[in-house]
Amino acid sequence: MTAGRLGMIWAQDRARGIGRDGDLPWHLPEDMAHFRETTRGRPVIMGRLQWESLPERFRPLPGRENVVLTRNPGYEAPGALVVTDLAEALEHVRGQDAWVVGGGQVYELAMPHADVLVVTTIDTLTEADTFAPEIDEDEWRVVHREPARGWTTAANGMRFAITRYERAGA
């Protein structure tokens, strides 16, 4: 990303499911490594529920400034900056490349502000209760897909593909 762009990154099933009961409905180490590599050294913006879903040993996410969005001004997230609205989070990261990392409500709020989407699609269907936003093909264009066709098979047998979108006309 070029300086000052806002990206959003998530993994989803074929029906855009991203979570169940506050957790990922799959285990895909290759995607976790991709997430770390993509977001390392950049601020990450997440909702309170996403923060709380992280294992304590990973709070805050290491190697990244963590910004936690919550409606509760008294909320404490040790090692992270707590903000009470998206505008405050965006102002804090202005001029830097930053990533929105979830959850579902924060993705919906941030979608109009995003410049880049990095989406891992996992070739499965889950009983998700949280979903990624729809990607409007008139607003977004695919700039890279790995693999270009088909799926990559993970060590655990799961199949996945990673697609990078940029806002059309940007």
Image (tube, rainbow, N blue to C red):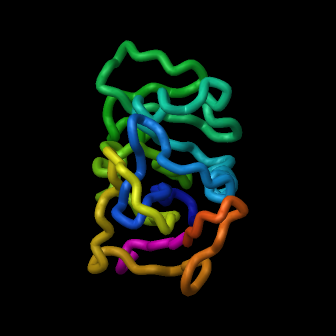
Residue 132 in sight in this render: yes
Residue 106 spot, x, y in % from top left: 35, 44
Total count of labels: 0
Comparing 129 with 93, the one in front is 129
Q: Which residues are magenta?
A: 162-170
Identity of the residue furthest to the bottom in this view: 149
Residue at (68% x, 47% y) in the render: 41
- Location of residue 44 with respect to 80 vertically, above or below: below
Residue 127 spot, x, y in % from top left: 35, 50
- Location of residue 111 with respect to 81 vertically, above or below: below
Answer whether residue 153 is magenta in the image: no
Residue at (55% x, 83% y) in the render: 150
Residue 120 spot, x, y in % from top left: 52, 64
Residue 94 in sight in this render: no
- Location of residue 69 with respect to 134 vertically, above or below: above
Q: Is residue 110 left or right of residue 154?
A: left
Classify the position of the C terminus by image quarter: bottom left
Classify the position of the N terminus by image quarter: bottom right
Tell me where residue 97 sits by quadrant: bottom right
Residue at (47% x, 16% y) in the render: 76
Principal secondary structure, stretch drawn in magenta: strand
Comparing 46 with 96, the one in front is 46
- Location of residue 81 with respect to 94 vertically, above or below: above
Answer whether residue 166 is magenta in the image: yes
Residue 57 spot, x, y in % from top left: 67, 26
Q: Is residue 24 left or right of residue 70?
A: right
